[in-house]
Amino acid sequence: MTIQMNIAEAKAKLSELVARAEAGEEVVIARDGVPIVVLKPARDAQAAAGDAPTSRPIGFLSHLGPVWAAPDAWESDNEAADFAAQSFEADFKPSEPRKQP
């Protein structure tokens, strides 16, 4: 069953219309008799969207999407470790001891 109401009437009966839409009825809100909005339960809207999120992401970088890392991102990199060790040795060779005056 479809219910159609103009905006002013729908504003006054919004709680009732939401309950009816949750129950499975199609609720159409019109402006001057022309349908402009259809109310439907969020679970139906998410199912129609396919992979719509079930909850909103939290965090200040959430607009960038999910974080991705290569599968081996946390594995040891021997080449980098060897390079760092060589650089450290080259920069910090022990110097001649100071002569006391």
Image: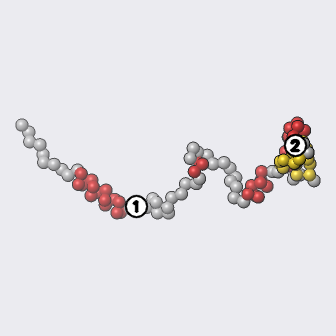
Foreground pick, 5 / 18: 5
Q: Residue at x 46, y 60 (%)?
A: 73
Q: Quick one: label 1 or label 2, which is nearer the N terminus?
A: 2
Residue marked by disc 1: 76
Mark in front: 1 vs 2: 2
Q: Residue at x 53, y 57 (%)?
A: 68
Q: Is residue 59 above or below residue 101?
A: below
Residue marked by disc 2: 31
Task: Give the farthest residue toward the left.
Answer: 101
The quarter of the image holding the C terminus is top left
Q: Is residue 67 visible?
A: yes
Q: Secondary structure at mark 1?
A: loop
Q: Secondary structure at mark 2?
A: strand
- Residue 76 at x, y percent in the picture: 40, 61
What crowding class fits label 2: few (fewer than 14 Cα within 10 Å), some (14-19), or many (20 or more)?
few
- Residue 83 at x, y percent in the picture: 31, 59
